[in-house]
Image (cartoon, helix red, strand yellow):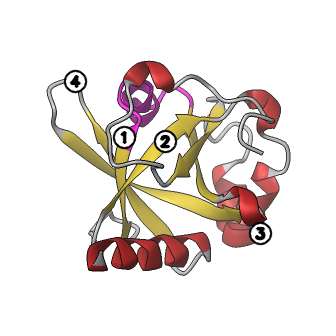
Amino acid sequence: MAESIQEQDLWDSFLHNKCKYISLGTLKKDGAVVRTPVWYVGVSHGTSGSELIVTTESNSGKVKRIRNFPDVEIAECDMRGRIKGKAISVVAQIVDPAAENGLVALFHKKYGLMFRIMSLPGRKARQRVFIRIRQPQTHEPISPSANQPISPSAHE
């Protein structure tokens, strides 16, 4: 019970954007964990829950790994990925492109000029995707087939 309270406190600190970076730990097919420092924003939907949103390039390894294994870990880290605290288990899903409205603005608000520079055309001509991170509803692992892109109204 005490551990779940600590995990909830950690989730709440992420949700309220108390740190700048999180380490996103995704699973490879061989079971190895790959940790990557990422920018994120916390989004609260009132009584319908909360989530963290991460953005990355659509062809990145983390996107491929999340499609195979949606169960991931997050922890506070610095910009180089050095973990600063305890990791918690969460579930990740690729956001349906139709549901992306307004997400870029959240990153602009939190990261300002740095996000704008990283988003300049020509800097990287790769398509960006958004990843939705939520607390699991149960402690049972979620099957990879449950990790289909979500529609805007699926969880709102």
Q: Is residue 146 above or below residue 128?
A: above
Q: Secondary structure at mark 2?
A: strand
Q: Earlier in the sequence, mark 1 or mark 3?
A: 1
Magenta-drawn stretch contains 59: yes
CB under 8 Å between callouts 1 and 3? no
Residue 73, percent across and down?
34, 53
Q: Secondary structure at mark 3?
A: helix
Residue 82, percent across and down?
27, 69
Q: Which residues are magenta?
A: 58-71
Could you give the CA–CA distance between mark 1 and mark 2, rounded to whole angstroms?
Answer: 6 Å
Q: Secondary structure at mark 1?
A: strand
Q: Crowding near pointer 4: few (<14 within 10 Å), some, many (20+)?
A: few
Report whether residue 123 is seen.
Answer: yes
Q: Which residue corresponds to mark 1? A: 71
Q: Nearer the viewer, mark 2 or mark 4?
A: 2
Depth order, front residue of 47/133: 47
Q: Which residue corresponds to mark 3? A: 109
CB under 8 Å between callouts 1 and 2? yes
Q: Which residue corresponds to mark 4? A: 29
Q: Crowding near pointer 2: few (<14 within 10 Å), some, many (20+)?
A: many
Q: Secondary structure at mark 4?
A: loop
Q: Earlier in the sequence, mark 1 or mark 2?
A: 1
Q: Give the residue type that dot 4 points to.
A: Lys
